[in-house]
Amino acid sequence: MVLQEDLQALVALGGVEEKQDGEIIGMFSMATGVLWAYQAEVKAIHKALSFCKEFSFSQVYIESDSSLAVGWVIRKENRPWALLNELNAIDWLMRDVGCLGVSHIYREANPMVDYLAKLGCDRTMPLWENLA
């Protein structure tokens, strides 16, 4: 039996902004502290959209390796009350940057993002870089 409190861990976020041809034009990596996995996934979507807003990236498509977080973003029902502020901010940012959609992608399909997230665990300062 696994107790729920055993599922909390030190987590980090990572993300990349790519052009359609795969050229990387931005990236972020940062520690978040101790969170539940689902909290970290919602925070990652929020940070990705915040990154796009800060660097004026528009007409973006967000991919996340959490089908649960993607479901909460796409469908407005059954959202956890503890994440409502973050999810409402995501709704606003999606409109603001002209987000074309949010979808689930397997972690193995984007090793660069997984690598940046793992590096984020050891970061004292966030990496937040526009390469365009």
Image (cartoon, helix red, strand yellow):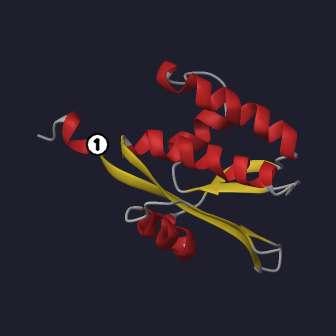
Considering depth in this image, is 116 or 103 the residue closer to the camera?
Answer: 116
Q: Which residue is mark 1?
A: 8
Residue 36 quadrant: top left
Q: How many marks?
A: 1
Q: Residue furthest top?
A: 81
The answer to whether residue 23 is above or below residue 43 is: below
Task: Look at label 1 and name its amino acid.
Answer: Gln
Q: Residue furthest front?
A: 125
The answer to whether residue 13 is above or below residue 80 is: below
Judged left or right of residue 9, residue 132 is right
The answer to whether residue 82 is above or below residue 56 is: above
Helix, strand, or loop for circle 1? Answer: loop
- Name the residue located 51 percent from the left edge and 41 percent from the top edge: 68
| Residue 47, visible in the rendered structure | yes
| Residue 16, visible in the rendered structure | no
Q: Position of residue 14 (x, y in %)?
A: 54, 62
Judged left or right of residue 28, residue 56 is right
Considering depth in this image, is 8 or 30 the residue closer to the camera?
Answer: 30
- Badge 1 local density, few (<14 within 10 Å), some, or many (20+)? few
Q: Position of residue 119 (x, y in %)?
A: 44, 70
- Name the residue located 66 percent from the left edge and 67 percent from the top edge: 27
For the C terminus, which image quadrant?
Answer: bottom right
Considering depth in this image, is 21 or 14 the residue closer to the camera?
Answer: 14
- Name the residue located 15 percent from the left edge and 41 percent from the top edge: 2
Q: Position of residue 108 (x, y in %)?
A: 49, 72
The answer to whether residue 87 is above or below residue 121 is: above
For the N terminus, which image quadrant?
Answer: top left
Q: Residue furthest left?
A: 1
